[in-house]
Amino acid sequence: LFAATPSLRVRAARWHPLAEPMLCVLTSDDVLRLYDVAGNPSAPVAEFHLGHDAMVAADFGFGRPSGWERFAILVLFADGGVGALCPVCPRGAFVATAAVEQLRAAAAEGSSARAWLEAAFGGGDGGKDGASEVAVVAEASKAVVSWPAARLQAPLAVEPLWGDGGAACASEDGAARACSVVSGGHGGELCSVVATLDTAGL
């Protein structure tokens, strides 16, 4: 990738919390790529284009381990805005069976949310570790990342925001009641941004 595009730069890189061999890399072309370092690290298994109305993606984090937020990637834009990419679930991700069943029960029959859960985790008995009651995405990785397509919600409502309005880095707070991001402005200001992910449409 970088040999073909020497001007490309890495803006942020983090391990996906649901699948440790999965490295998420945000580059200067506003594309978030997921790499399976245990499989074929030279080619991404998924790409998400984050360019949104001329907004520049500066950093990203992950939603808290609750509800659909566990499948959300929070995006911090350079102008201080926050977006959410959801649903994203890499192949090999581990999620508690009880959490999957809770989402399945809340999803309407025939809805895209129900179809996505069944594609990712099977009809209810899919890959399961009987001792730890953990469901694992072992198959259908193409369906998980391509249908239904992860949707970028941006900009999310944020409050409060202090400083110069710019943002350079992000850090998610998984213990907060809402998805939260703390960002640092280009001038050194500390901006506290709290964004609630809208999951009504999933």
Image: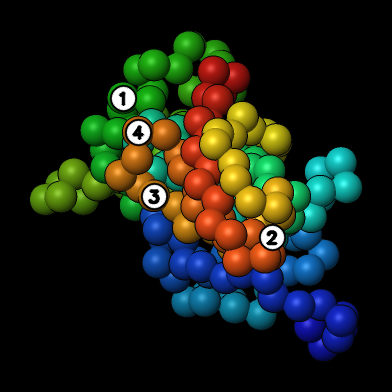
Evaluate whether residue 86 shows in this view.
no
Assign a secondary structure to mark 1. Answer: helix
As drawn, the residue found furthest toward the left would be: 131
Choose between 173 and 123: the one closer to the eye.
173
Evaluate whether residue 63 shows in this view.
yes
Quick one: label 1 or label 3, which is nearer the N terminus? Answer: 1
The amino acid marked with disc number 2 is: Ala
Mark 3 burial class by Cα count in 10 Å: few <14, some 14-19, many 20+: some
Q: Disc 1 and disc 2: Cα gap in Å?
A: 33 Å
Quick one: label 2 or label 3, which is nearer the N terminus? Answer: 2
- Is disc 2 in contact with disc 4, using a CB cutoff of under 8 Å? no
The amino acid marked with disc number 4 is: Arg
The amino acid marked with disc number 3 is: Asp
- Is disc 2 in contact with disc 3, using a CB cutoff of under 8 Å? no
Residue 180: x %, y % from top left: 46, 43
Q: Mark 2 points at which residue?
A: 58
In this view, the mark in front (1 or 2) = 2
Q: Mark 3 points at which residue?
A: 173
In this view, the mark in front (1 or 4) = 4
Who's the residue at 21% across and 50% down the image? 129
Q: Disc 1 and disc 3: Cα gap in Å?
A: 23 Å
Q: Name the residue under label 1.
A: 102
Q: Quadrant of residue 189?
A: bottom right
Q: Say left or right for 149 vs 1.
A: left
Q: Name the residue under label 4.
A: 177
Assign a secondary structure to mark 4. Answer: loop
Choose between 14 and 135: the one closer to the eye.
14
